[in-house]
Amino acid sequence: MRVGTDAENPPFTYQEGSEFKGIDIEICKRIAKKLNMQLQISKFEFDDLFSALAQNKIDIAASSITITEKRKQTVDFTEPYFDTINQTAVYNIKLLTNLILCVNNNNIRSLTIKYLGGFHENRAN
């Protein structure tokens, strides 16, 4: 089973020395074991994973890939096994103030703000 990854998305895919690790890699290892297949993992740039699939260079792209309508037109996906929301971290509180104004202008209903200075949480609606 030939797997392609960019190994740049811990904890899903990453590399320690020459060894590929992460959640996606562990899933691939278990699939290969279940199918009694040898696992071969190759590193690609993220954008090259889709062409590698199309050109039959790999059987699986494992790299924390988000399912989009555009991607669904050219590749098949498994059932999703991880769901998340977008998050942003900032170092400068002034930047955070600007971010909140920007988010509020885009009509986000709820925003959770956490900062390292005492782990304060403020909920803005």
Image: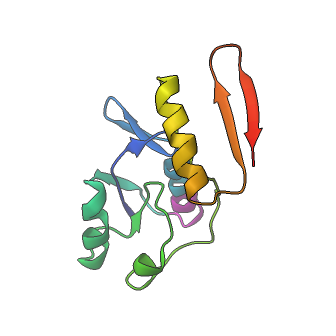
- Determine the main secondary structure of the stretch shown in magenta: helix
Q: Position of residue 39 (x, y in %)?
A: 41, 56
Q: Is residue 89 visible?
A: no
Residue occupying the far bottom of the picture: 73
Q: Quadrant of the N terminus?
A: bottom left
Q: In the image, which residues are magenta? A: 30-36
What residue is at 51 percent from the left and 49 percent from the top?
Answer: 102
Residue 94 on the magenta span = no
What residue is at 52 percent from the left and 63 percent from the top?
Answer: 36
Rendering quarter of residue 124? top right
Q: Position of residue 45 (x, y in %)?
A: 25, 53
Q: Is residue 106 visible?
A: yes
Residue occupying the far top of the picture: 118
Along the line of sight, the residue nearer the viewer: 105 or 22: 105
Residue 31 on the magenta span = yes
What residue is at 60 percent from the left and 62 percent from the top?
Answer: 34
Residue 109 to residue 56: above or below: above
In-image side of 50 versus 26 (left or right): left
Residue 95 to residue 100: above or below: above
Residue 91 to residue 80: above or below: above
In-image side of 120 versus 69 (left or right): right
Q: How does the figure colour the protein chain or chains?
A: rainbow
Q: Position of residue 80 (x, y in %)?
A: 62, 66
Along the line of sight, the residue nearer the viewer: 23 or 93: 93
Q: Position of residue 44 (x, y in %)?
A: 26, 54
What residue is at 55 percent from the left and 67 percent from the top?
Answer: 35
Rendering quarter of residue 40? bottom left
Along the line of sight, the residue nearer the viewer: 43 or 122: 122
Say how many tags the image has: 0
